[in-house]
Image (cartoon, rainbow, N blue to C red):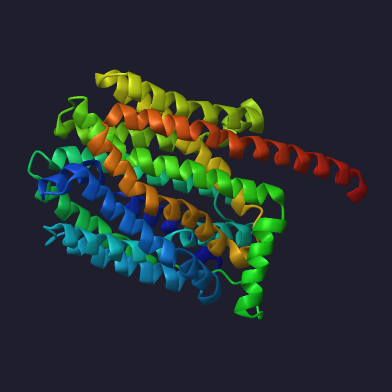
Amino acid sequence: MKRSLHNNIRTLYLMGFCQSFMVVLPVFVPLLQGHGLSMSQVLQTQALFALTIALCEVPSGYLADIWGRRPAILLGSALNAVGFLSLLWADSFMDFVLYEIILGLGFSLMSGTDLALLYDTEVYLQERQLPGGAGAGKSLSRLISVEAAASGIAGVAASVLLLWSLDGVVIAQVFAGVMPLLLALSLVEVPRAQREASHRDNMRHIVELLLFGKPVVLWTAFAIAVYGLLAIYVFWIYQKYWELQGVPLEHFGYIWAAFALVISVSARFTAALENRLGTRGLLLLIAILPLAGLLGMALGSGWTGVLFGLMIQLSRGVSMSLFYEALNSRVPGDFRATVNSLVSLGVRAIFIVTGPLLGYALDSVGMRSTLLVLLAVFTPLLGLVLVPLVIRIRREQAGSATEAPVAG
């Protein structure tokens, strides 16, 4: 059993790599535009993807908590494989809508469940003093780093495949999309006691945990939602931005790789940065970086504007590692997948409405104005979530310091 559980860690790293090896993403906007879609239609497909996840995210996360992590991951991987296969014949707006819906179903089952299984595995091995990985917190950071590195390698692969054609990128994506299903077959479930409470009692417990449990949990969830929303916006802006800056299409993959590498490295060294700067200093850094990046992209031109995007990526890597560790370490294993899914739901739900508006803004008012609007919106938003989070972290630390002598 312990050997199988230890293999879980390596398998989840490999699955994370394959899932993030999305060679189609660095050129996805040009690919859809090549099939006659406008930016507004591109963002409509992404809104439908977000809607599918919004409808299925929490039920699938709860299913993973009750039914088991492995079955949920297997079903999600199978749906993702079918979705990527559909790219082989996709040629119209409705074809890409179908592709996004199938992927939405698959990713909703995978989202949060892989993190929960990785965290469960590390905690189980650590509690029983069995040989394991790097520890629960470090494993999450490493998974984020592995996924970002895979995205970077996929970017380079996309640029190389473009020397052949966009069709080569699509074929490579199909092969990469099937691999997680094969890897998922070797996963094993972590032994844990099954709750005998009713579904209504479970839901009430989850709501109480988020709203009335540790205050840091709620505000960390808010922070993940805000940073996640910003990440999705710039994710779909980048390729159009590079096009407007005169960057040749064959260079998109290399830029994508550099952007992903920044996320990978920053996530990997988040713990070291936190030790050096302190939690409050690190939160201040990840608040300043994305705002400076948006401003630099709006006012810069050519490669200068492109490079400013790296500041957003740096903040993304650190914030993901910091916030997801803070959240998962404070959430009981019984509901870890559900809570992770609820956080993702918040991001997707907002994007359902605002995603098409972002596409409309890009088509109508242009890139610079759109970036400045995002800057104006996210400047107060980041303050609204980070200031209360800092206050509650200080209170939690003060409470822990007060309780320590009593425990002794």
**Position above or below: 98 against 365:** below
> Which residue does the image show at 48% across and 55% down from the upper left?
344
How many tags in the picture?
0
In the drawing, does residue 6 fall left or right of residue 395? left
Residue 105 spot, x, y in % from top left:
35, 66
Q: Is residue 182 visible?
A: no
Q: Nearer the viewer, residue 233 or 1?
A: 233
> Which residue does the image show at 81% across and 44% down from the upper left?
400
In the drawing, does residue 103 fall left or right of residue 243? right
Picture quarter with the N terminus: bottom right
In the picture as drawn, the residue positioned furthest to the front comes out as: 364
> Which residue does the image show at 46% across and 27% down from the upper left?
291
> Which residue does the image show at 40% across and 23% down from the upper left?
295
Place residue 244 in its image quadrant: top left
**Position above or below: 183 against 34:** below
Place residue 246 in its image quadrant: top left
Q: Nearer the viewer, residue 399 or 227?
A: 227
Residue 296 spot, x, y in % from top left:
38, 21
Residue 267 spot, x, y in % from top left:
48, 38
Place residue 124 in its image quadrant: bottom right
Residue 128 spot, x, y in % from top left:
67, 62
In the drawing, does residue 229 fall left or right of residue 401? left
Q: Nearer the viewer, residue 231 or 39?
A: 39
Q: Is residue 293 visible?
A: yes
In the drawing, does residue 353 fall left or right of residue 140? left
